[in-house]
């Protein structure tokens, strides 16, 4: 995945059970999209 602002990026393809760790530093909603499927979107809400 990559965040829409390009600041957060995992490796493009992750296998089942693999982990991607990233630490949020402020609250907010972060939209992201799948690296290999355009239009596969999601968002992370940090409270
Ligand atoms: Cu995808």
Image (tube, grey):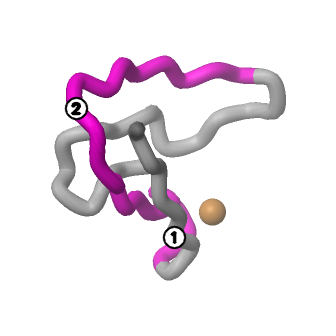
Q: Is residue 40 above or below residue 32?
A: below
Q: Nearer the viewer, mark 1 or mark 2?
A: 2
Q: Which residue is mark 2?
A: 26
Relative to the observer, which residue lies in front, 46 or 22? 46
Distance, label 1 to label 2, CA atoms, is: 21 Å
- x, y (%) of residue 9? 34, 38
Please tell me which residue is depicted at 48% across the width and 76% down the height of the picture: 38
Is the distance from the Cβ of mark 1 to the nearest ligand 1 atom less than 8 Å? no
Mark 2: C-beta under 8 Å from nearest atom of ligand 1: no
SS class, disc 2: loop
Q: Is 27 situated left or right of 13 in this image?
A: left
| Ligand 1 visible in quadrant | bottom right
Q: Residue furthest bottom?
A: 39
Quadrant where the C terminus sits is top left
Q: Please tell me whether the stretch drawn in magenta is mainly helix, strand or loop.
A: loop
**Range of the magenta residues?**
18-38
Magenta stretch: residue 9 in it?
A: no
Give the percent coordinates (x, y) of residue 4. 26, 62
Of 24 and 35, nearer the camera is 24
Mark 1 vs 2, N-terminal side:
2
Image height check: is 32 above or below 40? Answer: above
Mark 1: which secondary structure? strand
The residue wearing badge 1 is 41
Horizontal side of 16 relative to 43 (left or right) equals right
Residue at the farthest right position: 16
Residue name at image x 59 percent, y 42 percent: 13
Where is residue 28 drawn, in percent x and y? 29, 48
Residue, far front: 47
């Amino acid at each position: 995945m990559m965040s829409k602002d390009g600041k957060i990026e995992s490796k493009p393809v992750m296998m089942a059970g693999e982990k991607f760790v990233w630490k949020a530093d402020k609250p907010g909603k972060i939209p992201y999209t799948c690296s290999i499927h355009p239009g596969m979107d999601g968002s992370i809400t940090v409270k």
